[in-house]
Amino acid sequence: MSGKLEGKVAVVTGGNSGIGLATAKRFVAEGAFVFITGRRQAQLEAAVKDLGNNAFGVQGDVASLADLDRLYAAVKATKGRIDILFANAGVAEIAPLGAITEEHFDRTFDTNVKGLLFTVQKALPLITDGGSVILNASIVASTGNPALSVYSATKAAVRSFARTWILDLKERRIRVNAISPGPIDTPGLDGLAQGAGEQLKASLIAGVPLGRLGVPDEIARAAVFLASDDSSFVTGTELFVDGGAAQI
């Protein structure tokens, strides 16, 4: 029995851990060949080994346009096309209003907005007509969260991109959708907690009607839906995968 993504070529940025790696695993399991990126070479190599023969790693930072050029040169040379693009790479740091630095602002916007925009734009010559682009947003784009204003603003921009790009790409029938995860148990969440891990997780769980954190594979399964023909009439939308957290 063939998978839902049989024969497809996918790119997952930030595919060396967390949601990105879980999604790359799902894509491979459904029959796709997957290119993943990550900033840390050793972690990237470990992820590629974990994924198996249908994966290829390209070290790089999406905030660097030269790194994106190297990524797509590798894709072009190896497979010549992209059917699915999951623009997943992102960073999150806590900084309350009054303590926001220029460095914090630039770092967050450079990766989450500029990096995501050029991840998609530079892929366009390789994306097949009728392809699927998935943007990793967040429920914080539409909820208020203390000390996360810059990160939340970047994710609101990502949500907006999904709406506008479907018009820019309509002649090519390229679908663009956003996934908005709620609190997911990832290494990134652990890093955000910075010593207040269990306390932060407990407070997040208290705001989730399903009463728990999500796991990366739950986002990955939603990404498979948006990548596949199962969502052939779905474009420009925001799919909340949040245990109900943003709905109350």
Image (tube, rainbow, N blue to C red):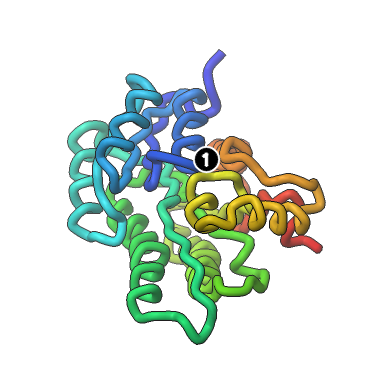
Circle 1 residues within 10 Å: few <14, some 14–19, many ≥20: many
Q: Position of residue 91 (x, y in %)?
A: 43, 59
Q: Quadrant of residue 117?
A: bottom left
> In this rendering, does residue 85 appear at all?
yes
In this rendering, would 160 be left or right of 24? right
Q: Is residue 92 above or below residue 243?
A: below
Q: Position of residue 134 (x, y in %)?
A: 49, 50
Residue at 40% x, 41% y: name it: 15
Q: Quadrant of residue 216?
A: top right
Q: Position of residue 212 (x, y in %)?
A: 73, 45
Q: Which amino acid, mark 1? A: Ala
Residue at 28% x, 31% y: name it: 45
Looking at the rendered image, the quarter that the C terminus falls into is bottom right
Q: Is residue 16 above or below residue 123?
A: above
Q: Quadrant of residue 232?
A: top right
Residue at 41% x, 31% y: name it: 8
How many numbered discs, if any? 1
The residue where tag 1 is placed is 227
Question: Regarding mark 1 in the picture, which secondary structure is present there?
Answer: helix
In this rendering, would 90 be left or right of 243? left
